Image (spheres, rainbow, N blue to C red):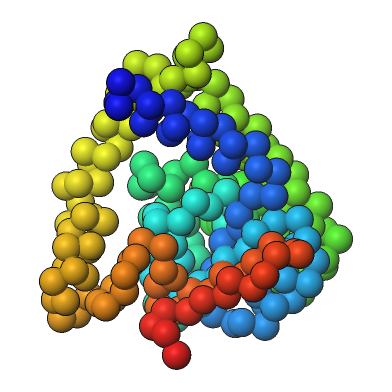
Amino acid sequence: PGALVELREVSIVNEVSVMNERGTILIVDDERVVFESLELFLEDKHDLIYADSGSSGLLMARTERVDLILLDIGMPDINGYELCRMLKSDPETEDIPVIFLTAFSSSNDEAVGLEAGAVDYIAKPINSPIVRARVQSQMMLKLQRDYLEVLVRQDSLTSLVNRRGFDELFSREWRRAWEPESYLRARSRARSGAPGSDHEACPNPRRTCPPGARSTPSAGRPSTKHWWPPR
């Protein structure tokens, strides 16, 4: 009975999450002014989180519930092309649509970006109506696809996760458990206070933004902006 209740709760949470029309956008850009500019015309319809480097963007894509990524190309640690390829080669992040938003505006740059796995390519300077329309279009496609995925993995009579959903969940968690930097190992290091852990002394490491990451609240809700490490 306990297992059935847990599976039912997972199913309900997934369905409610999918039907959340706002969606979450991860913005990866080493220039904070870009994030602040996008905030002006995107935060009324979407939840925004921010990473100022490729490495922190990759970590957030793997640990946060992200529906769309706006990605710069010219970053100091991992360039956008390489980061996009890494996201598309990871089963945990391969289904997240990526839109390049960059100053690299040649046709060759665009071709490389699309070949890396991006669904769209927008050249700077930022044109707010164009960016908003393209983001909204990709967000709607992503949320509709997610909802169909929930229906495929859910028993229509009991609303429980079906065999296919259970098998995929088990397979995903099994792979994650064997990753060198899995969540369980990271949490174990944090609890033991192991040196070198980014989550040292953090009571809830999975929900805390990694270095260089920032989140913004939805419009009309109290501020929940947080940084790591705390200032």
63 relative to 17 in the view: left or right: left
Question: Toward the viewer: 116 or 228?
Answer: 228
Query: Which residue: 67% across, 83% down?
Result: 33
Query: Which residue: 76% across, 56% down?
Result: 45
Picture coordinates of residue 18 (x, y %)? 59, 37
Q: State the residue lying farthest toward the bottom.
A: 231
Q: Can residue 109 be seen in this view?
A: no
182 relative to 153 in the view: left or right: left
Query: Which residue: 25% across, 46% down?
Result: 176
Q: State the residue lying farthest toward the top.
A: 157
Instruction: Give the answer, above or below, for where 86 lies relative to 5.
Output: below
Q: State the residue lying farthest toward the right.
A: 129
Question: Toward the viewer: 77 or 205?
Answer: 205
Picture coordinates of residue 59 (x, y %)? 38, 63
Query: Which residue: 17% across, 63% down?
Result: 188
Instruction: Give the answer, above or below, for where 105 lies relative to 169.
Output: below
Picture coordinates of residue 231 (x, y %)? 45, 90
Q: State the residue lying farthest toward the front.
A: 1
The answer to which quarter of the image holds residue 147 is top right
Picture coordinates of residue 145 (x, y %)? 60, 31
The mark total stands at 0
Instruction: Give the answer, above or below, for where 209 lies relative to 5.
Output: below
Instruction: Give the answer, above or below, for where 125 lies relative to 170.
Output: below
Query: In the picture, which quadrant includes the N terminus?
Result: top left
Question: Toward the viewer: 42 or 200?
Answer: 200
Q: Can residue 177 be seen in this view?
A: yes
